[in-house]
Amino acid sequence: MKRTGVFICHCGINIAGTVDVKKVAQELAKHPGVVHAEDYVYMCSDPGQNLIIQAIKEKNLDNVVVACCSPTLHETTFRNTSKAGGLNIFRCEIANIREQCSWVHKDKSSATQKATKITKSAVEKVRRNESLEAISVPVTRRALVVGGGIAGIQAALDLGNSGFEVILVEKNPSIGGHMIQLSETFPTLDCSQCILTPKMVEVSKHPKVKLMTYSEVQDVSGYVGNFKVKILKKPTYVDPDKCNLCDECTKVCPIVVPNEFELGLTGRRAIYIPFPQAIPASYTLDIKACPGLMPIACGKCADVCDVKAIDYDMKPQIIEEEVGAIILATGYDLYDKANMAEYGYGKYADVLDGLQFERLCSASGPTKGQILRPSDHKEPKEVVFIQCSGSRDPENHCAYCSKICCMYTAKHAMLYKHHVHDGQAYIFYIDIRSGGKGYEEFVQRAVEEDGVLYLRGKVSKVFEDKGKLKVWGVDTLTGKHIEITADMVVLAQAMRPAQGAQELAKKLKLAMDKDGFLAEAHPKLRPVESVTSGMFLAGAAQAPKDIPEAVSQASGAAAKAVTILSQERLYHSPTVAKVLSNLCTGCGMCVQVCPYEAIAHKDGKVEVNEVLCEGCGTCSATCLRAAIQVKNLTLHQVHEMINACLGG
Amino acid sequence: MAEEFEPKIVAFLCKWCSSAGSDLAGVSRMEYPPNVVPIQVMCSGSVSPLYIFSAFNKGADGVLVSGCHPGDCHYIKGNYYARRRIHLVKKLLEFVGLEPERFQMSWVSAAEGTKYTQVIKEFVNELKPLGPQNKLRRNP
Ligand code: FES
C-alpha cells in the first residue's frame, strides 16, 4: 500500500481554536495507509514546510496530505514543498479544514470529527492519484486587438513595438473611436485630433500591425496561446488602394442619412468618408442606405469614379487568423438618450448630449467650431449642463457613476465660455468628483476664471417655452426651486458598454459584470485580465474611464499579453479526461456535451484532445458506462471520498 | 427523546463558485451546522448520478449538489447539464420512495457566503424531522 503522510496545521489558533488538531492526527495515524501524522503551528512557514520535506525523505512517503486552509491559498505552496521533497506535485492534496470547518463551527467535538472526515477524504483521494506532468503546448506568437479606439490603438502599438504581430480589428470604417470625435481634452485642453491622429497614422503604418477596419470578430475558438479567430470583413465596395479621395462620388449620391460621426447633427451620403482624417483614408458605401448595388437602381457613384475604385461586386469575406492572446478594447457608447424623456431629449433640437456638444466645439465639426443652436443657428447665451444624466440612478437608469462626466462637463462649460464670452453656463450636479492629476484645479478654474455657476441639485424637468428651454430643478443646498430659461441644454449621459460588445462577449465566453461591462479576473489584483486566460481588457469596455486611464490599462493589457507571447510554450493542467477504451462503446454522448469540443470519435471509440480539455468532467457524468473519467478525480476516487466523508 | 438526530450530509461543491462561496462563508466567520462534509468537484456538471446513489448507499441522510448560477459556470454550460441530470435523478429517487427533501441542488456563487450558510442551515433543518435514511443504505 502507498505510504501517506498527513500534516495538520494549527494556523495559530485559527484551526486549533476549534479543531482538536492532536486528535485529528491520532485518528489519521490509525487510517489505513497513513504512516505518518503530525501537527504543527504554521505548516506554511519555512520550518513547517521543512517538516514535510524531512518526513517525505525519512518516512519514505509516497503521498502527502496537508490539512490546512483552502486549496486556493496554499495548494501550490504545498505541492511545491512536496516536489522539493522529491514527489510529483499530484502526490499532494489539501484538506480544507479552516474555511470549510474551523471558521464556520463553534462546537469543538463536532468540528474535530468533521475535520477528521475531510482529511481522510483527502487521504483516500491522494492514494489513488496518478503522478502527472503538465501538458505543454506551443504558443502562436501574435495577438488580436478588438476595437480601434485609443485603448486598442495603444495596445496594438505596444505589442507591435515589442516585436509581435498584431491584428487590429475595428467595426467602423475608420479607427479613432470616440476620442477622435472630441474637440479638446481635460484637464490640459489639448486638441483631441492633434494628439490622436499621429497615433492613428503610426498604428496604420506599423510594420507589425495588420489593420482590419469595417470588420467584426465572428467567432473565437481554442485556448490561451492558440486561439483561432474568424473575422468578418464587411464590403466597403470601394478599393482603398485605388480611391484618391476626389470626393466626386458623394457629390452625385442622391441619398442623405444622419451622419454618425457628427452624431446626427448633419447628414452624410450613402457613400462617405467618416471624417477627413479617417484611417484608412477611403470611402465606404453604406449598403443599408444605398438604393441598390445594381447599376439600374442608381450606379451614379461608379459612373463618376475616374479611377474605377468602386466595385459593386465586393463580397463579405471571412478571414481566419491564429493568435496567442486577445485584447478587448471595445469601448463605450452613451446611454440611450431616448430613456431621458424628462430632459426632453429627442423632442427639442437644442437638448444635446455631451458628444454632440463636443462636435459643436470642434473646429472640424458641423459648425466649424462655433457654438450654435441646432434649431435656429443662433448663439446660445445661457446653457444648462446636467451631470449624472442616467448615472447614479439605480431606480430608473444606471446605478454606477460614469466617472468622466464631472470633468468633461467642467470642460464643456469652460469651452462654451471661451467661445461665447458674454454667455452664462450653469451646471447641475450631485457631487463633483475630480480625483486625478490636475483635475480639481481644472474645476476650480472653470468656477473662478470662467464664472461657471454650479448648482447642487437635480433637474426635474426640461420643457420648451416660447422658443427657449425652461429648466426646473431644486437647489439641494438652499432647498429653493430653481427655474432657468436656457437656450441650450447639454446632458452628460452615462457611459454604457459599446453596442455589440455584449454579443461579442458571449461569443468569446467572457464574463460581464451586472452592468454589462467586461468583468476583470480580480477587481484589485488582476484588473486587466479577463476571467478567460489569454484574453485581456483595455479601456471603457471594462468600466467607464477617461483617456489617461484607458491608455494605461491598454499598455497594461499589452504587457500582460506579452507575458504569454514571449514564451515558446505554455503549460496546461494535466488533470484532463481520459477514455477507458475497454469500456467505451463509442456512443458519443460525451462528444455532444463537451463544452470545448475536446472529444472526437475515433475507430469506433472516442478520443480526448488533451490540449483542448479543461477537465470539467461533464463527459464523465454523462457516460453511462463510466468509460471516460477525469484524471485524479475518478469515479473510484469519489466513491472512496464519499465513504470517508460519511465516516465509513 | 434522547439525543437529537444529526443528519449526515455530503455536499458536492463546484470548485469555481460554490466551494469558493463556502470558503467565503469561512472567511466571513459565518456559522452553520457541521453536518455537511464537502467534496470539491470541478463543476456541478461532473456530478454523476453514481456519486449521488453511492452517497445514499453509503448512508448519507442527505446529498447536496451546488454549482455556479445558471449562465455563470466556469465551463460555460456544465451547470445546465447538471440541472437537467439532477432533475431526472430526483424523479428517480422519488420513484423508488426516497423523500424528495433528501436530495437538493443549489446555486451559490463565489460571492455568496451568506447564501451557502443559509442553504446548509435549511437543509439540515429539513432533514432532522425525517430521521435516518434507510431506503438506499447498504446495511441499515
Ligand atoms: S464550474 Fe461551477 S457549475 Fe460549472
Image (spheres, rainbow, N blue to C red):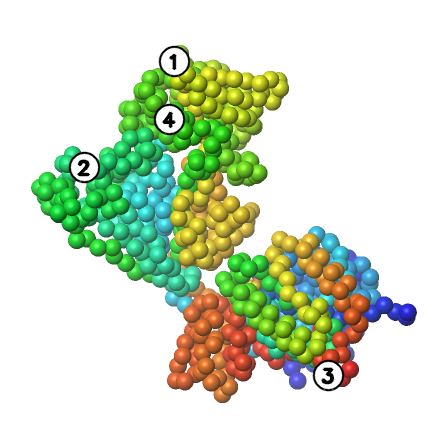
Q: Position of residue A313 (x, y in %)?
A: 17, 53
Are marks 1 and 3 in one subunit? Answer: no
Alpha-carbon span between mark 2 and mark 1: 40 Å
Residue annotated with mark 1: A421
Identify the mark at residue A254; answer none if there is no mark: 2
State the CA–CA distance, disc 3 to disc 2. Answer: 84 Å
User: Left of A205 or right of it: where is A299?
Assistant: left
**For the residues marked 1 and 3, what is the alpha-carbon distance in whole angstroms?**
90 Å
* Disc number lying in front (3 or 2): 2
User: In this image, A199 relative to B28: left or right?
Assistant: left
Cβ–Cβ under 8 Å for marks 2 and 1: no
Query: Observer-nearest residue: A58 or A194?
Result: A194
Above or below, comparing residue A627 to residue A168 in the picture? below
Q: Do the residues marked 2 and 1 share a common chain?
A: yes
The residue wearing badge 4 is A349
Q: Amino acid at mark 2?
A: Pro
Mark 4 on the same chain as mark 2: yes
Disc 4 to disc 3: CB gap under 8 Å: no
